[in-house]
Amino acid sequence: MPLLVMKFGGTSVADLDRIRNAARKVQREVDRGYDVIVIVSAMSGKTNELVGWVEQTQPMFDAREYDAVVSSGENVTAGLMALTLQEMGVPARSWQGWQVPINTTAAYSAARFVDIPRKNLDQKFAEGFKVAVVAGFQGVSPEGRITTLGRGGSDTTAVAFAAAFGAERCDIYTDVDGVYTTDPRITSKARKLPRIAFEEMLELASLGAKVLQTRSVELAMRYKVRLRVLSSFEETDENSGTLICDEDEIMESKVVNGVASSRDEAKITLVTVEDRPGISAAIFAPLADAGVNVDMIVQNISEKDYDDHPGSVTDMTFSVPINQVERAKRAMEEARQAGHIAYDELVVDTEVAKVSVVGIGMRSHAGVAARMFKALADENVNIKVIATSEIKISVLIDRKYMELAVQALHDAFELDKA
Amino acid sequence: MPLLVMKFGGTSVADLDRIRNAARKVQREVDRGYDVIVIVSAMSGKTNELVGWVEQTQPMFDAREYDAVVSSGENVTAGLMALTLQEMGVPARSWQGWQVPINTTAAYSAARFVDIPRKNLDQKFAEGFKVAVVAGFQGVSPEGRITTLGRGGSDTTAVAFAAAFGAERCDIYTDVDGVYTTDPRITSKARKLPRIAFEEMLELASLGAKVLQTRSVELAMRYKVRLRVLSSFEETDENSGTLICDEDEIMESKVVNGVASSRDEAKITLVTVEDRPGISAAIFAPLADAGVNVDMIVQNISEKDYDDHPGSVTDMTFSVPINQVERAKRAMEEARQAGHIAYDELVVDTEVAKVSVVGIGMRSHAGVAARMFKALADENVNIKVIATSEIKISVLIDRKYMELAVQALHDAFELDKA
């Protein structure tokens, strides 16, 4: 029997009416001949309520107890979904993480999958159950305690089940109807992509497109799980939404498929740093130790040579998430006081944004960077930092130009055209 | 290490402040040198919310899914209580039913205990944990699914743990400060009993005193678990509340220790029933089959012999819970139409109440019934039905006299005096 995984997020199961609406989508797939594994999140708001209680009780909470408490919302939805499906005449039952079992590491509140044995669910499918409703976001540790996967973990649960059970596809039902060429709130020319490659989705997810959790895309890419994002709130069919798949499944791809933007960036410059072998390590090791996620890095090519700085010196610029600026400053100050690094000044610019173009076509097409820089230059947008990967070019610019830059790039790469 | 079981009901853990208040009571017992097993209910209102969702989804719900959903409230409280205790410096962890495990039958939503192996909790106590916080009301079936014990089941969970772990005592913290000689809302002379025997508490509980679930008292009696009822909302010490214990622990007992009353009664009379061997079975078997809980039964001793009823005839009167009257009427009508019984008329009186006096001293004292009937006669209260057990006398009277009768009996047996 072909098998589908269908995942419904918090807004898709926010109340009994929405659960019924989701159940109808499951029923349709059963009617088409599929066995279905349904992964559910907690009703929207429930997990936040539980997290709030835990944090009020113990600010530095015991992650074991945190997991035991916050996992309960998914259990409620799983039971209600199973009841709703039964009421529609679909043989279904709910599964909590420990019942499957969903074996994870003991890294409470940030656990990772170890394995998902198929035996128990396969047995129920063989007995005639058509749907297994599984509580997302949770698992069980080797010592038999409940674990959670970190926020948004239900997407990852869905992909893990699709991989373990060889599902034909993993459908992620959510409150948007697919993946767009760019944020539709920035330009109405944004267009829904029928297909996108895993690598592109991964770049877009890590660049701040919130439609899928990065980890779930990584997992899907590793196990070649065909992932589809589609709307819970519209009528949907086989062609709805966006399919995230191997690039082999994408016949013709543009050079650039998406423009991403993020305003949660800050730029830090260390002015007049001694330019010697090992200086990068001396700067970035303490930042890593402090848990700062350094994103883009630029070392000025210009050399300075002042009287008070004999030898070669340079400026070092890097970007960090804006909420990590204080932590980064402290780490740099401490490294300077400990004598590990020397710099004249630390300059922070929080009025920046990151804009990126993403596309697997870049691998085989030259000139993408030039086209990008020209489009920005035509709008008089100054580029502060540049970073590239094989399928992505990112630039840091003044935040006030962010929307303008996105629109210019969307036009320049003709993303509004199919 | 001596061990205590402490149980906190829904109002005692209704919010984070109350959980903290309850945790302080636990901490005090730990400071006194006890290991403690804490049994918690769901925050008040939570279970009702979950039950409501299930019933809206599926009016005749699958009890397996019902149990999976409604058990989640206790898991939340257990985790929050463990976190609160940790924050106070008390080594504690939470346990869900399947983790202990609390093995029950597979009678979902009305499961019964099979056994509670001590191994897992004993190991944690040996490792230095002082408190095991256990989610009440739930267990796990032989097939590994979650079960619940029926409403109020957390009291029973507490007693079962006290029995399994040989606890010195099982303290039930609730919103009343003990067991009273009668309902204090009926007479201000009602007095808190320092001690009461299991058998008496069992009669009072089944007569409608809501302070403890009947099943928990039965279990306590069977395993000789010393049970104490006391207030969550007052300062309490070793002598607070009411101890429910073996009668051997009660030095001097009065003949009567409590007066109970219930207004949820109805009287049904079958007029002119054929009086023959087997007639009682013919009447009460269909009532039992229909799930009607018949309480008191009286067969009129007067014989009738009319022209149209040759042979011996009688009237049969019995009481049932008022919400089961329709079911009882239907069962009787069907039995009559099937030719199993014959009667002229079925008369229902819903304006009745039951008043009972309870005391283990009755076993060795004669004249209790006479004293009771005289007290009621002095107030011109007419008795409709009488039922007795070894330690209880119940009468059915007009409902409008209920409070009067309770006050008269409370005075007659001098229950206001210690």
Image (cartoon, coloured by chain):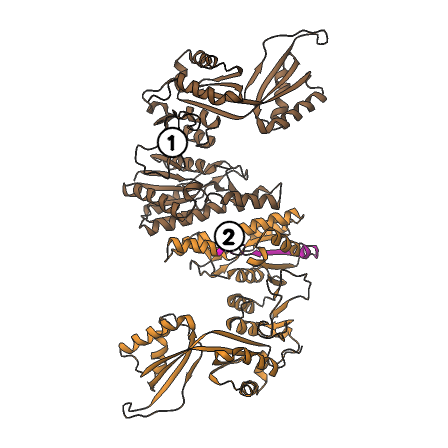
Chain colours: A orange, B brown
The residue to which callout 1 is attached is B178
Q: Secondary structure at mark 1?
A: loop
Return the x and y of residue A349 as percentages of the image width and height: 41, 79
A278 is within the stretch colored magenta = no
Which residue is at 38% across, 70% downward? A291
How packed mark 1 is, by other alpha carbons closer than 10 Å (few <14, some 14-19, many 20 or more), is many
Which residue is at 33% across, 79% downward? A282
User: In the picture shown, does residue B205 fall above or below A59?
Assistant: above
Is residue A323 visible in the rendered structure shown here? Answer: yes
Q: Tag 2: residue type?
A: Gly
Chain bearing tag 2 is A
Quote the CA–CA distance across marks 2 and 1. 35 Å
The residue to which callout 2 is attached is A73
First to last magenta residue range: A27-47
Q: Please tell me in which quadrant of the rendered image residue A3 appears.
A: bottom right
User: In the picture shown, does residue A101 fall above or below A273?
Assistant: above
